[in-house]
Amino acid sequence: MNDFSADQAVWTSKLKEAFGPTVELEDENGVTSVYDLAAEFEINGQSYAVLQKPGDQSGEFDILKVVSSPEGTLGLVTIDDDDEWENISELYDEMTFPEDSED
């Protein structure tokens, strides 16, 4: 069950405004990977970024938390809590593919 609903979320563009349409992430081994910034949104004061590998047509994506340092520098961190990750993933699906849309 999702703790959030799409009407509570707000689309944002903090990272895109700061870094452009792509971001580079370095893993724990020092390997850098480039990701497209597919979407950003905020819910209950917490921002999230949806990242996708460039050219990936599989529809798979990663969702990371957007954090801000005391100096105001934006960064991304993994969502470690399984329940939070599940809720945020379901929320993004709901925001992207609303079931009740009638066209």
Image (spheres, rainbow, N blue to C red):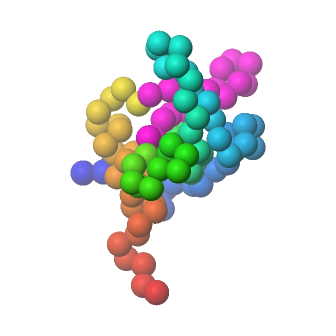
Judge whether 70 appears above or below 15 on screen.
above
- The picture places residue 40, in percent across and down from the top left corner, at 58, 48
The residue segment tinted magenta is 62-78
Q: Is residue 74 left or right of residue 42?
A: right
Judge whether 75 appears above or below 58 on screen.
above
- The picture places residue 6, in percent across and down from the top left corner, at 45, 60
**Is 72 within the magenta?**
yes
**Is 39 within the magenta?**
no
Residue at 44 percent across and 41 percent down: it is 62
View extreme (front): residue: 55
Q: Quadrant of residue 82?
A: top left
Res. 85 in view: yes
Q: Is residue 73 left or right of residue 36?
A: right
Judge whether 100 appears above or below 96 on screen.
below
Residue at 41 percent across and 55 percent down: it is 59
Most prominent secondary structure in the magenta stretch? Answer: strand
View extreme (top): residue: 29
